[in-house]
Image: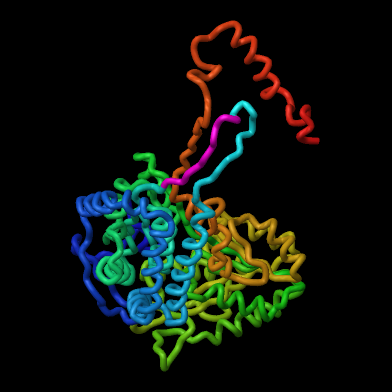
């Protein structure tokens, strides 16, 4: 199994030629940062076994006890934010402004699940539907999967590893993460802090490697959370099926934006520029394809092109901030270059950008393409780079049809007069739609985020985002009764004559209405 975290849609991995080490490079400069050892399948098995042995005690702490330790992790992240950002910026090539989103998001997520876990996964009391169960007390408790394995990508190395770990840990699971071989350093720093600075319970660890390591993790754990390409997601699911291990898969998107004729065009153009170019377009929720109603198409394209053309690209620091950073994976840059080249050869035009940048580091110019159509890769496949394609639509119906013409269904956005835009948004075929905004749904953690179609299975955030890490256990408790229940042995004609009419009354008749309890 390839890792799926080295590049979205490619089987090339980021390990060095030596099978037992990974070389981590700075994408902004090309320089070597560090070499780290690869975990063998035996090491993976031993790591999972170790945290599994401690999981029962972690579960027994209860929701508040676990929140106590996650609160310490939150405080460490905030107290060491600059240190974390330095590491993350070095291994990803992000600009500082993009990297700075991660610690704050994680702190907020810890607070969210710490304050809501009791209502989401606390024990439930259920009222019996039938008087025949009046003597029974019905309860549902939510028990954690003992060990959750997380295979995370390189585009947000903390949000998409720790962000999936936090609800799992809060639910009572032990967690082992295999981060991307391109960006393992920031997560390792946090895990080491959990162990040595925070002194947290030994239920949280990571293992490093490529495909073999990821496959070994799938084999050992009780639940898998995977984020990466849809192709690798299928392989993860197939591997997990061998042990009937449940999975949650976030497999990317080709997120559309619809711009209606009554939209605020300045806001829509500014949103498209940020939503398409933020983190160099390396976001599963990035705006990648835009459909604009004909009356405002030219105005929108002109304003979008001007906004994108003003973006500053390169390695930044406090004295010299930039807007768009490097591509984190050279393999992904090759995919972006291929998509743009394919589109231009088929008749598309690049109004700005369109080229790989020469020099140190790995950069692709922020690019706006027009004269595109759905025969082109750039409008069909996940580009995952700083590129947007813009198409003219006759009306809202055609824009909606084009937006839904995709094998992906992760996110979308609609810009226009609020009521009309909301009406269109409700018909987009995806897991989350923003009205007059972009990307913000990821930070609205009160509601679930998950993909339709080939964008995945399962949800992050909201109640489903923690409940997926639990198994429901129903408790039916008899509160009173004699030596025997009426339905137990021995079967007699007398009992049958007594029970049959009662069963028919409550099972085959609307008894609530007959007794005046419902109209």
- Magenta stretch: helix, strand or loop mostly: strand
Q: Residue at x 74, y 63 (%)?
A: 396
Taking the image as drawn, is residue 148 in sight?
no
Determine if the magenta segment contains residue 40: no
Q: Relative to the observer, which residue lies in front, 1 or 38? A: 38
User: In this rendering, is residue 264 above or below 132?
Assistant: below
Asked if residue 378 can be seen in this view, the reply is yes
Q: Residue at 55%, 87% (x, y): give it.
A: 310
Q: Position of residue 223 (x, y in %)?
A: 39, 48
Up-down relation of residue 388 to residue 461 (above or below): below
Determine the image quadrant of residue 463: bottom right
**Residue at the limit of the structure toward the top, as seen here:** 493
Q: Position of residue 207 (x, y in %)?
A: 27, 59
Residue furthest bottom as drawn = 319
Q: Is 150 on the left-hand or right-hand side of 261?
A: left
Q: Nearer the viewer, residue 341 or 493?
A: 493
Q: Quadrant of residue 197?
A: bottom left
Whether residue 460 is situated above or below residue 242 in the rendered picture: below
Residue 178 lies, in percent from the top left, at 32, 59
Q: Which residues are magenta?
A: 134-143
In the displayed structure image, the side of residue 151 where residue 135 appears, left or right: right
- Nearest to the observer: residue 502 or residue 355: 502
Query: Which corner quadrant of the image does residue 5 belong to?
Result: bottom left
Count the marks: how many?
A: 0
**Residue plotted at (79% across, 32% down):** 516
């Amino acid at each position: 199994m390839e890792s799926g975290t080295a590049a979205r849609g490619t089987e090339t991995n980021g390990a060095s030629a030596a099978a037992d080490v990974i070389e981590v490079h700075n994408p902004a400069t090309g320089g070597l940062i560090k070499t780290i050892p690869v975990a063998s399948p035996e090491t993976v098995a031993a790591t999972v076994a170790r945290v599994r042995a401690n999981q029962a005690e972690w579960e027994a702490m209860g929701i508040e006890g676990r929140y106590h330790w996650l609160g310490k992790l939150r405080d460490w992240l905030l107290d060491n934010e600059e240190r974390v950002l330095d590491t993350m910026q070095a291994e990803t090539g992000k600009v500082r402004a993009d990297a700075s989103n991660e610690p704050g998001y994680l702190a907020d997520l810890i607070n969210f699940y710490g304050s809501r876990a009791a209502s989401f996964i606390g024990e439930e009391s259920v009222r019996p539907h039938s008087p025949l169960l009046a003597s029974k007390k019905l309860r549902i408790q939510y028990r954690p999967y003992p060990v959750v394995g997380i295979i995370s990508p390189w585009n947000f190395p903390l949000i998409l590893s720790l962000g999936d770990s936090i609800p799992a840990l809060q639910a009572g699971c032990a967690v082992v993460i295999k981060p991307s071989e391109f960006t393992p350093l920031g997560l390792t720093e946090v895990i080491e802090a959990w162990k040595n600075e925070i002194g947290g319970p030994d239920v949280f660890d990571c293992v490093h490697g490529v495909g073999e390591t990821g496959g070994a993790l799938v084999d050992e754990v009780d639940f898998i959370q995977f984020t990466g390409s849809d192709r690798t997601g299928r392989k993860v699911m197939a591997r997990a099926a061998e042990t009937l291990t449940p999975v949650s898969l976030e497999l990317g998107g080709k997120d559309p934006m619809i711009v209606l004729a009554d939209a605020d065009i300045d806001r829509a153009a500014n949103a498209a520029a940020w939503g398409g170019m933020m983190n160099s377009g390396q976001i599963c929720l990035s705006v990648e394809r835009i459909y604009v109603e004909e009356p405002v198409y030219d105005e929108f394209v002109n304003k979008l092109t001007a906004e994108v053309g003003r973006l500053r690209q390169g390695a930044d620091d406090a004295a010299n901030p930039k807007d768009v950073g490097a591509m984190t994976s050279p393999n992904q840059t090759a995919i972006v270059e291929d998509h743009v080249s394919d589109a231009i050869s088929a008749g598309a035009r690049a109004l700005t950008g369109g080229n790989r940048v020469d020099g140190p580091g790995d950069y692709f110019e922020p690019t706006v393409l027009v004269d595109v159509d759905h025969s082109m890769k750039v409008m069909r496949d996940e580009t995952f780079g700083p590129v947007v394609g813009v198409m003219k639509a006759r009306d809202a119906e055609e824009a909606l049809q084009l937006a839904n013409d995709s094998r992906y269904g992760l996110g979308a956005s609609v810009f226009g007069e609020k009521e009309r835009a909301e009406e269109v948004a409700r018909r987009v075929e995806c897991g989350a739609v923003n009205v007059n905004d972009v990307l913000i749904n990821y930070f609205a953690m009160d509601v679930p985020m998950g993909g339709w179609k080939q964008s995945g299975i399962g949800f992050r955030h909201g109640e489903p985002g923690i409940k997926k890490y639990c198994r429901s256990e129903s408790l039916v408790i008899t509160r009173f009764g004699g030596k025997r229940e009426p339905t137990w042995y021995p079967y007699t004609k007398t009992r049958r004559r007594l029970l049959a009419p009662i069963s028919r009354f409550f099972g085959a008749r609307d008894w609530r209405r007959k007794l005046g309890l419902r109209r």
